[in-house]
Image (cartoon, rainbow, N blue to C red):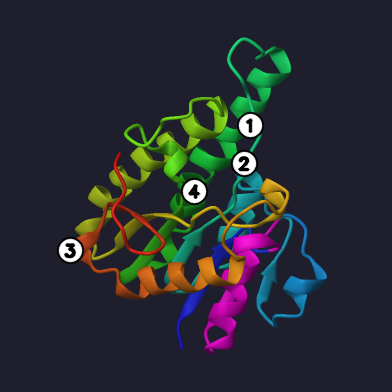
Amino acid sequence: MQTILVTGANRGIGLALTRHYRDRGDRVIAVCRTPSDALQATGAQVEAGVDVADDAAVAALAARLAGVELDVVVLNAGILSRQSYGEIDAAGFAAMREQFEVNALGPLRVLQALDGCLVKGSKVGIITSRMGSMGDNSSGGRYGYRASKAAVNAIGRSLAVDLEGRGIAVQLLHPGFVATDMVAGRGEVAPEHAAAQLVERLDQLTLDATGTFLHANGSPLPW
């Protein structure tokens, strides 16, 4: 049995990951802002009230988990808002900054706070998006989301370099276009299918592959 921590665990991909790990017998620490009934039903250890953009909330989580050794950390919490060129007003720029706080700085904030829970052999999965890829951008738009995911890709690469000497592997994972509330259910992949693929990628992750950017199906993605 492994100990797994998942952020953004109350719905969507995070909930599906929690269920998948629980179903195979792992201990799951499910981190979220507000727990859902579906999350409570998984039997996971729910750590609610944690906004990954809130320094104090993240520090309190770390204090509660002091002494816990984490085998896998899945940094999944994220938000999406849409900005189009020529239409970005003050509220739009504020929404872009919020996406940076949650999508880019959130994973770094959480992982740094939980550093004492990481041990040799721990694995870190950052749920990013191919929308953060420069080479894959052929449709433009989504300025805040694209930029925040590009930023977390850069952060993930740095984490891979900084943690490799401690035997900790990091991987950046695009889950696919998943049918979640964040995209109003318009995705092409069920959360359960995405979760199964993501878990497979993390199960297979070794230090030889640390810092890689992959689709959940295992295909490499361009930076």
Mark 3 touching mark 1, by CB under 8 A? no
Q: Which residues are magenta?
A: 10-32
Mark 2 lies on a secondary structure that is: loop
Q: Earlier in the sequence, mark 2 or mark 3?
A: 2
Q: Nearer the viewer, residue 84 or 211?
A: 84
Instruction: Give me the disc on residue 208.
Output: 3
Q: Is residue 154 magenta?
A: no
Q: CA distance from mark 2 to mark 3?
A: 31 Å
Please, what is the three-letter code of the amino acid marked with disc 3?
Asp
In the displayed structure, does residue 123 sit left or right of residue 28? left
Q: Nearer the viewer, mark 2 or mark 3?
A: 3
Residue occupying the point 67% across, 13% down: 87
Mark 2 touching mark 3, by CB under 8 A? no
Please, what is the three-letter code of the amino acid marked with disc 4?
Pro
Q: Earlier in the sequence, mark 2 or mark 4?
A: 2
Q: Residues within 10 Å of mark 2 (few under 14, many from 20)?
A: many
Q: Earlier in the sequence, mark 4 or mark 3?
A: 4
